[in-house]
Amino acid sequence: MVLQRISDRERRYVMEVLDSQFRTSSGGIMTKRLEEEFAKRFHTKYAISFINGTATMHAALAAAGVGLGDEVIVPPLTMASTSFAVIHCGATPVFADIDPDTWTVDPASVEERISPRTKAIIPVALYGLLPDLDPLMDLAGEHGLFVLEDDAQCFLGYYRGRMGGSIGHAASFSFQSSKHLTSGEGGMVTTSDPDLATRIRRVSSLGYAAVEGGAGRGKITKETIQDPNYERHVCIGWNYRMPELCAAVALGQVERIEELVGMRQKVARLYDEVMEECDWLVPQSVPGDRIHSYWSYVARIDGTSVSWHDFRRKFVELGGDGIYAAWKLTYLEPAFRDRLLSPHQRQNYSKGLCRNAEAVQPRLLQFKTNYLDLEQAAQIMDALSRTIRDLGG
């Protein structure tokens, strides 16, 4: 089976946009269709499109009132964009440790990190696995906190029968090129709160008065907008809107979401079969109450003298497609490490801050799942199996 990453459907939608000549009267057609379809697929009332999956988080936090002097609790094992979005709001990232088996943020550690300054929590669906969200939502309710799901790596993931993107107060998705669905770049925020949706859209659209939270834009007459006394900007905002060409591609991808995500899940099952041969590679634990969407398939080297670099070297030598490492923990990146990024910062961004994350990160092998051909995936599995046998552990 060979899957098309970009199909005729996406090409047809792009041509519809080009044929419109980008006339103002025709603008926003694909964006509106994309947002309506995304909201429907993800069981939320509203979906707001963005230029990328970092702008999404910045806008959602800003719309929730996160600002100077506030704290936002984040996990350290993920892309630094999660923490950058906090800093973009003038707030301070506070790092909570991870569960040693699922590698997603640990609710007990989050509870320990809550302070009077805490305004929000960003739980990340790591590698396509949703974190333990109900305890986090309970903490949020108890302390009056905003919960923003970072689901950039998780399309069609489920937690206790509910789809990722519909559980927190809002959720952020990415259409960056490596993701399950892509338009090259782009992002989406989902929420079912109409007031929050309107604020998010205004933050993303230069604070324009003439927007509303739903898929459509607020209606405004030419008589109003051409009036010299018309007041356009009701708040400070950014220009984070998704271009129509990206929306056209993203719409086609969303309409094909089951096959695009399903292919990665099939590849993950092939990895599962190979991992059964080995007792020193431990895959990410998937609790029974969750469905993993497998943006990537990740295993931890455990109980062996085989090093991360030795494993990758042998895998490539035997025909493997390379292995990505887990991101360096955000607070150990040069931009953060041993620096005071805020006068309100109460954590020392240095080793020892999140011990579980520090123990796990250097041992994670991140395998690709974005194979469009199961025969090619089978060849990769053969290389992986031979690597395991040759290294022995």
Image: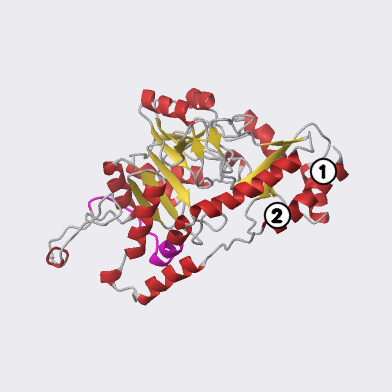
Q: Is residue 239 magenta?
A: yes
Is 148 left, or right, of 331 in this rendering?
left
Specify whether 301 is left or right of 148: right
* Rendered view: 348 above or below 142: below
Q: Residues within 10 Å of mark 2 (few under 14, many from 20)?
A: many
User: Which stretch did the figure color magenta?
Assistant: 234-249
Q: Judging from the image, what secondary structure is the residue with disc 1 in?
A: helix
In terms of secondary structure, what is the magenta stretch mainly?
loop
Q: Position of residue 223 (x, y in %)?
A: 12, 66
- Residues 56 and 227: in front is 56
Residue positioned 51% across, 51% down in the render: 258
Residue in front for this viewpoint, 349 or 369: 369
Q: Residue 356 has which mark?
A: none
Decide if residue 198 is on the left or right side of residue 11.
left
Q: Is residue 260 among what the camera can see?
A: yes
Q: Tag 1: residue type?
A: Ile
Distance of mark 2 from mark 1, alpha carbons? 17 Å
Q: Which residue is mark 2?
A: 377
Q: Nearer the viewer, residue 112 or 386?
A: 386
What residue is shown with label 1?
388
Q: Which image quarter holds the C terminus?
A: top right
Kindly indicate the quadrant of the structure image that contains residue 177: bottom right
Compare residues 347 and 277 and report the one nearer the observer. Answer: 277
> In this view, which residue lies farthest toward the front?
1
Q: Amino acid at mark 2?
A: Ala
Residue 365 visible to an observer of this rendering: no
**What is the crowding at mark 1: few (fewer than 14 residues within 10 Å), some, or many (at least 20)?**
many
Image location (x, y in percent) of residue 136: 45, 28
Query: Does the magenta segment cover residue 383?
Result: no
